[in-house]
Image (cartoon, grey):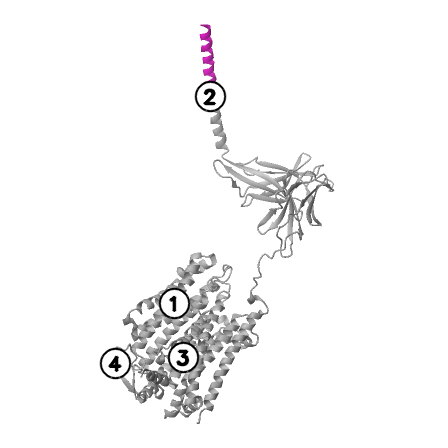
């Protein structure tokens, strides 16, 4: 009897528990539905830092519009306020609008404040659009430079990249344990220098790679080599390039210059022309001579 | 001696005629010009004078008086140049190729073809000068020509072909000149002096005849490569230019095939006019028209073949620049001219001339008129629409630059050139026999 009562008790509690779970699940689904219907459209911001070959530093904010069950789209025409952050105070730096690719780029000037570790912190915020108000992204970057050099000893050709971070006082210090990838320029883009093209800098900030054999260069063997730090958490993207006669000399195209565009006709053309002209003049002279002879052969 | 007068397919018994009748028939147009002939010559001179005045205005005010602008920088002068060169090729076809292939029926047509050739090649050489903004610099082409320029090649072949065609005409004319000198009476003194001077003391002795025969055979061989060169090089003026519609390896043979067709059309018109006006029915017969009709079908088919190559392949591959041009040709503003030239100027004549009835003088002459009109319009289409479809789209220019229609000055000058070529042929046929008497007699003797 006692056992039956216990079973009944457990069954009733289990039913209540199941009912509770069903209730909670239903409420949760309803709430989730409400949330997704509210957030059917939202904008995601991404912030990247880039230093080009001329050491011009930029920050690019990409706005992506996400609509439920649709592919993400570039958000064009989004107004963004860019702030710099220093000692817990923010200062409006620039106002930008995203282009057709959903991107807006700002040039980072030397005047922007950095913290004691040399880090510059920016955040971009949507403030003028109530639908996306509060959407923001934050990022920090430290200025860096790559000095790229080449060396050749015996038959080994090396490419050496020295990466330095710029401190708050403006002095460079070696940037250690950062991945640098080496590339060589090809006709339609950059090709990594072999399978192990990414090398981590040592404590001196140096990463080097042996230039592979059989890479084609121009007709004098010249190649353009790139070293890149790519989307690093501290330094963003930094790149440098150099030229070296490390490639195999290749004449990429046969000489296709047209004889018509040269200032002087090629020999074969001049010969053909003057031969044809001579043949015509000789033939005509022969015919005029025949006329002369016909006149001479007359008794009139 | 009596000669058969009607060339036929040997199913009919030929009429016969004696040598004196042949001379009388063929010298008749020289002896007297009727009032219709005088009106015709006066009309042509009047058109030439209007053209000369138009050219004076062009010289005075510059090429601005034409409709040629930055894009359509070549207009109907260049179209007409290509047309005149095309017509001139027929001299080589009729007089040389048919002669060397031992066709006998060419004989009464040879001089008509040679005269048309010379008249048109003279016009071709002159109209190029009209297209120049500074005609006073024409001799710079000879003194400062660049060997690698197709323009210099063209100057070389046009002048060579002109001299050779004139010599061809002159050599074959020598026996007639001797006859004119000896037999014509009651003609002005200057005319008789001219015959005497040009006849070079022709007696028709054995040595002279042998030399003449040898020389004519030599010219027959020389003129074929020259004739093909002249129109091939004219085609290269376009084909060596990096433009959609011109930069085609097909252009040389395409031009030559078109030229033979156009020239043959012109000779058929000439045959009809001379047959009717000079009463030469005994010499230019239905048999000649029938043969010329068959030749026209053959040439029309060859030209159609090159047209298919010229338009089908670019239309199939449709590179964007070519596609724009072809779209204009097939469906756009040039389409009415294009389809006229392709259908009325080429395909329909070939179909119609397959029927014997259509190869009779009158229907065939009407067909030939359409072929010749189509030939001129085709040269217009080769030149102008291409210039109005450059690789870089035409933008930010005055509206007048985006299209081309010739000004009255251009039309007057081109009409003057056409009249000048007709005038040359008319005056020539009034001074010299338009059918070579010696050639006809030689042909008859061969038959006998």
Query: What kind of element bears circle 4?
Result: loop
Label 3: which secondary element: helix
* Labels 2 and 3 touching (C-beta < 8 A): no
How crowded pointer 2 is (Cα within 10 Å; few <14, some 14-19, many 20+) is rated as few
Looking at the rendering, the stretch of residues picked out in magenta corresponds to: A1-19
Q: Where residue A296 sits: x, y (%)?
A: 47, 91
Question: Are the two marked residues, 1 and 3, in contact with CB atoms closer than 8 angstroms?
Answer: no
Chain letter, disc 3 residue: B
- For the residues tagged 1 and 2, is the chain the same? no
Q: Position of residue B120 (x, y in %)?
A: 43, 77
- Residue A170 falls inside the magenta stretch: no
What's the distance in space between the residues labelled 1 and 2, CA to CA? 89 Å
Same chain letter for marks 4 and 3: yes
According to the image, label 3 marks what residue?
Answer: B114
**Of marks 1 and 2, the one in the foreground:** 1
Per the image, the residue denoted by label 2 is A23
Whether A21 is drawn above or below B156: the answer is above
How packed mark 1 is, by other alpha carbons closer than 10 Å (few <14, some 14-19, many 20 or more), is some
Task: Give the percent coordinates (x, y) of residue A270.
Answer: 56, 72
Is residue B156 among the parts visible in the rendering?
Answer: yes
């Amino acid at each position: 009897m006692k056992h039956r009562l216990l079973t009944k008790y457990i069954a009733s509690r289990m039913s209540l528990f199941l009912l509770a779970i069903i209730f909670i699940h239903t409420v949760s689904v309803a709430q989730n539905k409400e949330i997704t219907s509210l957030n059917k459209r939202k904008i995601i911001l991404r912030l990247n830092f880039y230093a080009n070959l001329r050491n011009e530093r930029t920050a690019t904010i990409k706005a992506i519009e996400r609509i439920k069950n649709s592919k993400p789209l570039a958000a064009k025409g989004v107004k963004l306020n860019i702030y710099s952050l220093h000692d817990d105070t923010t200062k409006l730096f620039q106002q930008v609008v995203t282009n057709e690719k959903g991107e807006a780029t700002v040039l980072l000037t030397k005047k922007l404040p950095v913290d004691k570790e040399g880090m510059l912190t920016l955040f971009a915020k949507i403030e003028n659009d109530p639908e996306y108000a509060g959407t923001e992204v934050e990022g920090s970057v430290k200025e860096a430079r790559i000095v790229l050099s080449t060396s050749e000893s015996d038959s080994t050709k090396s490419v050496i990249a020295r990466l330095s971070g710029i401190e708050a006082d403006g002095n460079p210090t070696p940037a250690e344990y950062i991945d640098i990838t080496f590339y060589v320029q090809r006709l339609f883009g950059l090709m990594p220098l072999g399978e192990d093209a990414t090398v981590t800098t040592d404590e001196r900030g140096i990463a080097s790679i042996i230039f592979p054999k059989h890479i084609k260069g121009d007709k004098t063997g010249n190649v353009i080599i790139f070293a890149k730090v790519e989307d690093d958490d501290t330094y963003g993207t930094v790149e440098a390039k150099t030229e070296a006669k490390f490639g195999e000399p290749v004449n990429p195209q046969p000489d296709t210059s047209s004889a018509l565009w040269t200032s002087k006709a090629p020999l074969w053309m001049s010969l053909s022309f003057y031969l044809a002209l001579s043949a015509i003049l000789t033939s005509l002279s022969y015919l005029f001579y025949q006329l002369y002879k016909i006149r001479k052969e007359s008794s009139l | 001696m009596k000669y058969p007068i009607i060339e036929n397919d040997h199913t009919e018994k030929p009429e016969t005629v004696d040598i004196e009748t042949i001379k009388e028939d063929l010298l008749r147009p020289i002896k007297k010009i009727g009032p219709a002939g005088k009106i015709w010559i006066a009309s042509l001179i009047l058109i030439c004078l209007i053209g000369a005045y138009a050219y004076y205005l062009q010289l005075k005010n510059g090429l601005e008086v034409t409709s040629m602008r930055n894009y359509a920088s070549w207009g109907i002068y260049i179209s007409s140049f290509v047309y005149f060169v095309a017509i001139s090729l027929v001299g080589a076809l009729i007089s040389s190729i048919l002669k060397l292939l031992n066709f006998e029926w060419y004989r009464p047509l040879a001089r008509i073809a040679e005269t048309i050739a010379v008249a048109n090649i003279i016009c071709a050489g002159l109209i190029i000068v009209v297209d120049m903004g500074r005609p006073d610099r024409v001799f710079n082409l000879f003194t400062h020509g660049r060997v690698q320029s197709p323009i210099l090649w063209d100057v070389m072949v046009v002048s060579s072909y002109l001299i050779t065609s004139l010599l061809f005409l002159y050599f074959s004319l020598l026996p007639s000149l001797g006859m004119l000198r000896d037999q014509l009476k009651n003609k002005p003194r200057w005319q008789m002096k001219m015959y005497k001077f040009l006849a070079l003391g022709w007696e028709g002795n054995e040595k002279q005849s042998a030399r003449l025969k040898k020389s004519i055979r030599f010219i027959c061989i020389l003129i074929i490569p020259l004739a093909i060169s002249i129109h091939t090089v004219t085609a290269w003026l376009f084909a060596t230019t990096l433009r959609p519609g011109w930069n085609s390896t097909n252009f040389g043979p395409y031009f030559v095939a078109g030229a033979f067709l156009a020239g043959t059309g012109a000779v058929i018109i000439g045959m009809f006019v001379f047959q009717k006006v000079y009463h030469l029915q005994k010499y230019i017969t239905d048999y000649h028209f029938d043969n010329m009709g068959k030749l026209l079908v053959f040439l029309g088919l060859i030209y159609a073949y090159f047209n298919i190559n010229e338009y089908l392949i670019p239309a199939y591959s449709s590179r964007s620049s070519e596609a724009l041009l072809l779209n204009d040709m097939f469906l756009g503003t040039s389409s009415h001219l294009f389809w006229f030239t392709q259908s009325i100027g080429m395909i329909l004549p070939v179909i119609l001339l397959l029927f014997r009835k259509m190869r009779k003088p009158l229907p065939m002459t009407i067909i030939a008129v359409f072929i010749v009109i189509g030939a001129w319009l085709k040269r217009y289409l080769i030149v102008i629409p291409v210039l109005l479809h450059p690789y870089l789209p035409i933008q930010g220019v005055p509206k007048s630059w985006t299209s081309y229609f010739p000004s009255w000055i251009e039309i007057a000058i081109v009409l003057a050139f056409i009249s000048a070529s007709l005038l040359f042929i008319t005056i020539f046929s009034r001074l010299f026999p338009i059918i070579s008497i010696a050639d006809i007699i030689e042909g008859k003797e061969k038959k006998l």
